[in-house]
Amino acid sequence: MIGNGVRRFLVSLSPVKLMVLGYLGYMLVGWLLLCLPISHRQEHIKYLDNLFISVSAVSTTGLVTVATNQYSVFGQIVIIALVQLGGVGYMTLGSFVILSRGRDLSDFRVGVSGAVFSLPAGFRIDKFIRSVVAFTFIVELLGAMALYFIFKSCGVEQPIWCSIFHSISAFCTAGFGLFPDSFERFAGNFWLNVVIGLLSITGAMGFIVLVDVWRRLTGKIEQITFTSKIIIRMSIILIVTGTILLLITEPAVKTMSPEKGLIVSVFQSMTAMTTVGFDTIPINSLRTSSLLILIFLMIIGASPSGTGGGIKSTSFTAVVALVKSSLRQDREVRFLGKRIPNYRLRVAMVNVVSYLFVLLWGVFALALTETTKSFKDLFFETASALGTVGLSTGITSTLSSLGKLITCMLMFVGRIGPLAFAIALVERPVEKEKETHDIAV
């Protein structure tokens, strides 16, 4: 009787609200599992820190108040499982199980999956989910195999587990690692930087692009969609721009050899744009101008239906196109010769404004609770949490209890998306379906 009541209640909710409850449920279950004594190595980890790690894992952020290696193997398995669930998306694995048994998806699951992935017109959700799971398994498996040989050649302990853990973490753009210094010890390792970079970019560009490119390669479509073109082009532009600026302006990079400096600059630009959050150079050693470069990349973030956060490259592109057309006094807003519909422009503007509002609120809230921290560090921490990035200048573990809770809220909202989160709060039933699909920008 209670089960039927709960089911009726869940079915009555909109897909966006269900998505919020789904991620929240993952976080609470993960918190309970991480609080178990079997999850810890020796010393007991505080309940608040376990909650922080669970939220960070599901939101695929990577900010930590305690090092991942302080958890036992069981605890690390819980963390990486939460990362996988957060990266692949709410209800996707359950929907895949249903499809694998030859059953059709209900309208209920189709609506939720559409909200999670923000699918544009033309994508069938059942085929898309199969492609998501298949691509995820294949990419993470290949990544783990490549990382195994790299870690083994470098003498890393438990190379198999390290390879699996970091492959999942990189593809889901989570930034969780088993090394206390992230990948700083591998700053000059070309192949590790390449493998982690490819995994992160593949996850950040998004499942839509992966399926789109695959359909193009197999000849099922003549050309990739306009959305995929924007995502690929903007990703390249942002990484190249960030790399050049870091090479020119960052003193710590200039002291390195040209080859190592280039590798570090590319990796750090990539890790900020994809919101994967790994680093090969201490973030607290960077000058303020370099931190601003990373903040800019973190705010723009990854792409729709990808595993990363940020305002998304498509929203940023729409706003840039709007500004450009306004300055030129054009009647229509175009990008790459294509007209951008007015409703997409409205959603993009609302998305950007909502994101910046939450960002400023986060900085303000942390400034009230963390009075001993510099504004620079708080701004960077807030941008990293909301963008689900995981980079930090080193203040995460020193935050007050209230500061940790504020950061948890920022990571949670960042995973859902400020616009989707706002819609979940104020959405009217008659407008559910249309508004949900408009989030794709």
Image (spheres, rainbow, N blue to C red):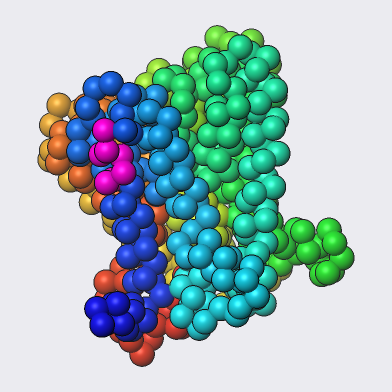
Please indicate, yes or no, whether residue 298 appears anywhere in the rendered image: no
Answer above or below: position of 138 versus 45.
below
Residue 169 lies left or right of residue 210; in this view the side is: left
| Residue 158 lies in the magenta-colored region | no
Please indicate, yes or no, whether residue 24 appears anywhere in the rendered image: yes
The residue sitting at 68% across, 14% down in the picture is 153
Residue 345, position in %: x, y?
49, 71
The residue sitting at 33% across, 33% down in the picture is 39
Residue 294, position in %: x, y?
46, 35
Answer above or below: position of 162 versus 261.
below
* Nearest the eye: 279 or 323: 279
Residue 63, position in %: x, y?
36, 36
Residue 200 in which image quadrant: top right
Answer above or below: position of 353 versus 119.
above
The residue sitting at 38% across, 86% down in the picture is 431
The residue sitting at 66% across, 36% down in the picture is 143
Q: What span is colored magenta in the figure?
A: 31-37
Considering every residue shown, the one lying at the far right of the view is: 219
- Locate the N terminus by quadrant: bottom left
Answer above or below: position of 427 versus 64.
below
